[in-house]
Image (cartoon, grey):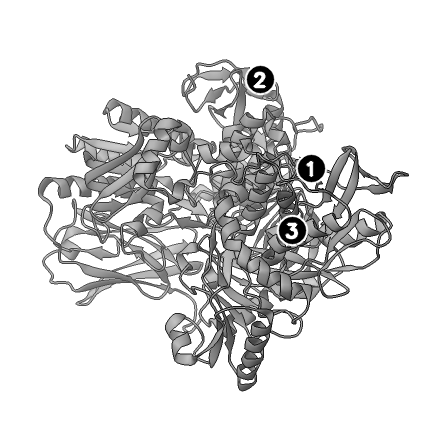
Amino acid sequence: MINKELVVIGGGPAGLAAAIEAKKNGVEDVLLIERDSRLGGILPQCIHNGFGLHIFKEELTGPEYAHRFIEELEDLNIEVLLDTMVIDLNENKQLTAVNREKGLMQIQADAIILTMGCRERTRGAINIPGFRPAGIFTAGTAQRFVNIEGYMPGKEIVILGSGDIGLIMARRFTLEGAKVKCVAEIMPYSNGLTRNVVQCLEDFGIPLLLSHTVVYIHGNSRIEGVTIAQVDENLKPIPSTEKYYSCDTLLLSVGLIPENELSKMASIKIHDVTGGPVVNQRMETSVPGIFACGNVVHVHDLVDFVTMESRLAGLGAVDYLKDKIPSDEYISVSAGPGISYVVPHLVDPEKILGEKQNFFMRSTKPMEKARLFIESDKNLIRTRVLQHVRPSEMISIELKKEDLANKDLKSLRFFLQEEGVADGN
Amino acid sequence: METKKITCIVCPKGCQIQVKLNNGEIVSIEGYECKRGIDYAKNEVLDPRRTLTTTLKLSTGGVLPVRTKEPIPKKLLKKAMLETKDIIVEPPVKVGDVVVENIAGTGIDLIATGNVE
Amino acid sequence: MEDIVIIGAGVTGCSIARELSKYDLSITVVEKEEDVACGTSKANSAIVHAGFDAAPGTWKAKLNVIGNRLFPALCEELDVPFVMNGSLVVAVTDEEEQALEELLERGRINGVEKLRIIGKDELLDLEPNLSPNVRGALDAPTGGLVCPYELVIALAENANQNGVKFWLNAPVTDIEVLEDNSFLVKTPKGSIQTKYVINAAGLFADEISKMAGAEEYSITPRKGEYLIFDKQFGNLVKKAIFPTPTKISKGILVCPTVDGNIFIGPNSNNIEDKHDTSVNVPGIEEIIAGGKKLVPDLPLKNVITSFAGLRAVSNTNDFIIEASKLVKGFINVGGIQSPGLTSAPAIALMVKDILQEEGLTLKEKADFIPHRPKKVRFREMSNEERSKLIKENPAYGRVICRCETVTEGEIIDAIRRPVGARSIDAVKRRTRAGMGRCQGGFCSPRVLEILMRELGADAIDITKKGPGSNILMGRIKEFLQNEGGDDNDK
């Protein structure tokens, strides 16, 4: 058994930021474990720009954003194991990892930060009828083939789902000389950022079919086409609207799921809505000393927010390792009407890190104008008017220490009310 | 008279802005909700620009991610892509290195966004 | 000149090939697909039936019961996952309860052992997730589960070790009977002259029989659709749960797989197109409704994939296993629908007997190898075993499929083994890489890379499942061309 003070599992943006933050704040013995042959997680394949506006105040590409952290990690001499897969984790903070050179390693950590990220929903998860030919890719897998391996998965493409990776890939394929026929989105609104709809679809005249979905996949060996239909308000296809699109490739950009196989092995409590661990204000899970941050906790819209959250987790681990903070007195943070979830799910109002506590949340539906209410069991703490709220864009709210501390609060609740719309809508 | 419809991307709101043009001159701008929208719409109509991000082949196999150092005229994106078709980059390359000068005659360089040893 | 050509590399053809490989014979298996087990054998319920279902006196009934008894030893010998977890036929109405008695009696006549009827309390004790409407069940402890494609692969590997040749991607286009009563079996890869032809062509057995001028019969594809759930719900049921059967089919089951998933299905619909393995909405709705009758709370949000299989149903509604009376040396093994998987080992023995009756002399090989090459299953090993293995071969230290914990070493082995994998799906069937919850999203680029390296092939040439199913269509920049003008949206 190898002993380590802090082990970070996953070398994407979350793992990099968490490891750096912990090392900078005095944890000497940090080990970062990454399953791929390079650091950066998904960033090296996200060659488009738009990263870093919050953290670096400039617009970077994915590889550049990753590069800044990788350089800092190297400068700090943080130990890294690449091409290494963690295959087991338990609640005693013991983990098993394997790689080619060192074989099977059993590691006892004093603290662990989970940063395994998320995976893409597949065809099976959305159950599209038809055949099972080659040529069906999740958008991220196609992105890896194009941007890392240097191959084109296809020439005539239909994209299902308007998630950001799908939109980005629509532009990438078009610029590479392929034809993107359309993007079908089952919801009546896009699931991607407006900027991506404009710069990836409108710039190239690619139709975005809202309230449409793929109802059938044709072709036995390689995909030959799809049938797309409009859906009604219950998201059920309307038969009379079916239309055939020939294509040699179908990309799926239909959502991301936090990857928590290891969390479950360690009996960490998982939140029903996010699919990630329930965490407190220091990003600590239900198992003391095991922290989690980034997309493994909840799927973020911007990497900058992942970095912010992960720095918090890094600091949380520092505090834990320093004096094994005794059990906090948590109050629950809940999502009321209009909000699907709030992270962190628990806070100890007396022990927040720094002067402010950040809360991330998502709305349940698009609202042009809405008022966010933050209330405790005692009082209404604050309200804030939000413009143009979308489920695809995270809402980030900071509460000051004095809003929370010394008030004997028992619970916090966030809810959204649409403004300018009659009640009962 | 010509009308161009612009979706503003300055903030997530996505205002639909209409710009009326007469012989290439802006006559009116409508539908914006803030000053930044006016500037964005003007640029989009008169000189729309985009940062091009793509990859180049490496002599060692594999690919190198690159971008234009500054946004280039939108209408030259495809021309710039065509120019990248036969370029083969010789490692080592570092983030920020210029790999293609003056892409598509824009005066703007293509720079590496990744390291290759 | 071959002694025997077997047409079709499904469970029937490969069982026969492996059985006959024990004797001094020259044998070739020809298969139209790129791998073995690509037809009915890869898409079915994977159940080793106890044998109470088929009408007494039929080949189905006789061979099922014999096959069932042969299964444990066969799977042991070939290192194929098999469990005898038992089957339950559940009744939810008075009528169905009565039907269970008939089924029990039929099973006794067929020679099925240990059958008994259990009441509601015992049933719900065994399977607490069943509907509260259940009345009781027929308990068949000798029912089991197997991984059907792994069985076929194991049979093929072992047959190959013992000298049987495999021609893949070789659809039979014609069969000519020569003057000396031998056959010329023609394929696009070339022709093979042989003394005997065994027609184990599954859905296409009728066409092959006709091609040779042997007896005419018809095979109708009967489609069954399935949904598979994530492994985290692997404890939903412990045994294969059948509804009380109808005249046409055994009904829609809720059933574990030997790999720890749960599936529901199949429905049962006769179709026309022998290539139509599509899954359709009405079918999905039908199997969900059927599954819910047995287990009301199905984890429908955790479906990882759906698929359809086609049963080869003959117009006699029984197996057709006989030497042709019209063409000497041609042996039909057709209409092998359920319980064909269970019956396969017994069918192989029966075909061996038929060949002897037809004048073939069988001489046992002295050097027959009964076991296939050792197979590593990293996910099932202890840490000590894993540690030792990686020291011997570092390729076992690189995990390629995270969902099913499959290592590079296992994938390389799958490619290098006898009748080795040549496509992404063939690797998947041999190793489970890509069968988990992410369905290959993470591992498929990596498996493709290993296939390229091992086969010395270009990435573009790697396929999902044989010719025409290429994964990639070109290098980057290849599709760029000057279309004139400089607008992007042209």
> Is C43 placed left or right of C359 in the picture?
left
Secondary structure under the numbered disc 3 in the rendered image: helix
Q: Amino acid at mark 3?
A: Ala
Residue for point 46% across, 14% down: B91
Q: Can the viewer see residue B51 in this picture?
A: no
Q: Residue C272: where, in percent of width, then height? A: 76, 60
Secondary structure under the numbered disc 1 in the rendered image: loop
In this rendering, the answer to whether A358 lies above or below C92 is above
**How many marks are shown on the rendered structure?**
3
Dots 3 and 1 on the same chain: yes
Residue for point 59% across, 73% down: C109
Cα separation between marks 2 and 1 = 59 Å
Which residue in the structure is indicated by mark 1? C25
In this rendering, the answer to whether C1 lies above or below A259 is above
Dots 3 and 2 on the same chain: no
Q: Nearer the viewer, mark 3 or mark 1?
A: 1
Cα separation between marks 3 and 1 = 15 Å
Q: Amino acid at mark 2?
A: Ile
Are there few (<14), some (14-19), or many (20+) residues within 10 Å of tag 2? some
Comparing A120 with A402, the one in front is A120
Which residue in the structure is indicated by mark 2? B87
The answer to which of marks 3 and 1 sits earlier in the sequence is: 1
Residue for point 46% across, 16% down: B98
Q: Can the viewer see residue B73 in this picture?
A: yes
Residue for point 21% across, 44% down: A93
Which residue in the structure is indicated by mark 3? C348
Displayed quadrant of residue C193: top right
Secondary structure under the numbered disc 2 in the rendered image: loop
> Is C82 placed left or right of A372 in the picture?
right
